[in-house]
Image: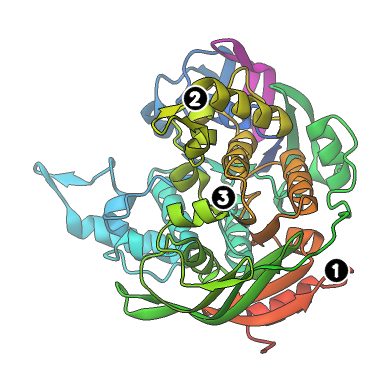
């Protein structure tokens, strides 16, 4: 049809042994925000890689501006005005803003880069995006929200007409997310066509004009956003009615498992206290939530307890009823029964080029050593198989490379790695970031089952609904300090209570 800028018709893409896309259709209008939703592994990213030229061996048709195209690489798609911004940003942190914006697209004159023109153009793009940053600023010194806007500036610099945003708000706090969504609306009003991929269904419904649901590599339905609700989206994505996301736990909360008092962490590199005078405890069988804005010190607190945070630590740690100094390193913490699962699974939690078995047992190999030096490989693999089955990891084999798994299944491997250490205290940092509603529900159930087994769980999350739905008690952090502590056993805590504490409206 003449009002479509892009038509993807009957797209089929196969990997060895897997049909990732099967007869998928997606039509995009000019000046439209078209959301693409589905569970991890549904085919969303694969479809966008076909569109952006990253995948070239597929069947079906791409029709752009009424003409059939078949991109042989990303450069060809960019030349036609298509840009993709992945969930993992493609910026080089050691370069400055201007250098990143023009990387691979430099303005050259007489064989040399015209820096004056590049800095001038960069400043214009930053003003257009309402980003008050000097183009000479090193990207590594910027917050994640600002880095997202730099990626969009790169796209605009390439005369982008179709912008693909893959989970753009996944790492962002609420304020930065809303600012980004408002920018996306403004780009739409200027005539840009946008494909918006997100697991945050409230955002999808608030911003999209049309929504396409993918499931298991198939197009399920495409309708105007106004015709969907969160419930109908979820049903279309998972193909079934989901039970209550946050089920009640049958836990007996026991004695204190871990407690820190007057806990402070000094960052010697930046010469500042990043955690100050924190008092926190978690009981056996309890789920304790830690909320707060990005930069509030939540991750630094968790890593310092786990022994993996560089810097001077003061304060007192009590573990299993005994007072001790802080753990000197993560190996000492794991051996004692404390495990921390990182918020960045791809960078710190997993070895993507290695298989599931290697990743799942990496932190617990000592449990399979026999005769002092030999690892019983059969026993190790058998235990991994048990964990894969228990956690319902979708994989043809435990020898599958972790990098080939969906985000939800990667997160389950992180949990398998944690559980195999047999922790008494488990610290989960953003355990559901960037995964779909079905996988989230399964992970909530796993957390509940661990608490029911008597494990003390500390859960850091930027998603207030899951903090409220999962936590027996909640600590809120602000500027490195505890700014609020709430009992939530009756699930009566509200988002407003947490927001006030996180922004300074409540003090303890």
Query: Which tag, 3 or 1, sits closer to the chain's start?
Result: 3
Q: Is residue 123 above or below residue 200?
A: below
Q: Is mark 1 on a helix, strand or loop?
A: loop
The picture quadrant where one finds residue 177 is bottom right
Give the residue displayed 60% in from the left and 28% down from the top.
384
- At label 3, counting other C-alpha atoms closer than 10 Å, the crowd grade (few under 14, some 14-19, many 20 or more) is many
Query: Which tag, 2 or 3, sits closer to the chain's start?
Result: 3
Give the number of the disc on residue 376.
Answer: 2
Circle 1/circle 2 CB separation < 8 Å: no
Mark nearest the camera among 3 and 1 is 1
> How far apart in space, not on screen, are marks 2 and 3 (Cα)?
43 Å
Q: Seen from this angle, which residue lies furthest left?
A: 110
The answer to whether residue 256 of the structure is visible from this angle is yes
Q: Main secondary structure of the magenta part?
A: strand
Query: Which tag, 1 or 2, sits closer to the chain's start?
Result: 2
Confirm whether the magenta stretch covers residue 22.
yes
* Structure colour scheme: rainbow
Residue of label 3 = 168
Q: Seen from this angle, which residue lies furthest bottom?
A: 507
Q: Is mark 3 on a helix, strand or loop?
A: loop
Span of residues in magenta: 7-30
Confirm whether the magenta stretch covers residue 316.
no
The answer to whether residue 66 of the structure is visible from this angle is no
x, y (%) of residue 101? 33, 51
Give the residue displayed 72% in from the left and 48% down from the top.
204
């Amino acid at each position: 049809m003449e009002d479509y800028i892009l038509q993807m018709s009957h797209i089929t893409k196969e990997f060895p042994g897997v049909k990732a896309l099967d007869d998928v259709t997606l039509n995009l209008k000019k000046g439209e925000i078209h959301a693409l939703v589905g569970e991890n592994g549904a085919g969303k990213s694969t479809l966008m890689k076909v569109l952006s030229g990253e995948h070239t061996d597929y069947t079906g048709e791409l029709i752009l501006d009424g003409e059939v195209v078949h991109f042989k690489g990303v450069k060809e798609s960019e030349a036609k005005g298509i840009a993709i911004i992945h969930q993992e940003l493609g910026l080089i942190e050691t370069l400055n803003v201007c250098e990143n914006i023009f990387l691979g697209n430099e303005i050259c004159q007489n064989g040399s880069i015209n820096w004056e023109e590049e800095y001038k153009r960069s400043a214009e793009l930053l003003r257009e995006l309402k980003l008050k940053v000097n183009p000479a600023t090193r990207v590594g010194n910027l917050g994640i929200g600002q880095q997202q806007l730099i990626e969009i500036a790169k796209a605009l610099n390439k005369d982008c007409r179709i912008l693909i945003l893959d989970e753009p708000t996944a790492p962002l706090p609420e304020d930065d997310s809303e600012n980004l969504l408002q920018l996306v609306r403004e780009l739409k009003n200027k005539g840009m066509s946008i494909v918006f991929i997100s697991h945050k269904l409230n955002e999808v419904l608030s911003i999209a004009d049309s929504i396409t649901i993918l499931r298991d590599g198939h197009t399920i339905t495409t309708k105007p956003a106004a015709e969907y609700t969160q419930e109908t989206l979820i049903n279309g994505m998972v193909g079934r009615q989901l039970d209550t996301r946050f089920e009640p736990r049958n836990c007996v909360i026991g004695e204190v498992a871990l407690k820190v008092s007057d806990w402070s962490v000094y960052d010697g590199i930046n010469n500042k206290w990043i955690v100050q005078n924190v008092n926190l405890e978690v009981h056996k069988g309890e789920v304790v939530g830690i909320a707060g804005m990005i930069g509030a010190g939540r991750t630094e607190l968790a890593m310092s307890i786990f022994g993996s945070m560089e810097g001077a630590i003061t304060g007192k740690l009590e573990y299993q009823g005994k007072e001790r100094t802080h753990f000197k390193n993560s190996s000492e913490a794991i051996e004692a029964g404390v495990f921390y699962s990182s918020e960045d699974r791809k960078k710190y939690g997993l070895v993507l080029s290695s298989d599931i078995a290697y990743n799942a047992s990496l932190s617990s190999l000592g449990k399979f050593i026999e005769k002092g030096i030999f690892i019983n490989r059969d026993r190790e693999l058998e235990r991994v198989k048990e964990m894969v089955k228990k956690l319902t990891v979708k994989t043809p084999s435990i020898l599958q490379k972790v990098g080939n798994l969906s985000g939800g299944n990667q997160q389950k491997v992180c949990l398998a790695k944690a559980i195999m250490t047999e922790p008494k205290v488990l610290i989960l940092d953003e355990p559901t970031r960037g995964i779909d509603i079905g996988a989230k529900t399964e992970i909530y159930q796993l957390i509940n089952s661990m608490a029911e087994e008597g494990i003390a769980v500390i859960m850091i999350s930027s998603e207030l609904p899951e903090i409220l739905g999962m936590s027996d008690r909640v600590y809120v952090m602000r500027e490195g300090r505890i700014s609020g502590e709430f009992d939530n056993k009756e699930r009566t805590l509200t988002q407003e209570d947490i927001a006030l504490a996180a922004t300074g409206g409540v003090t303890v």
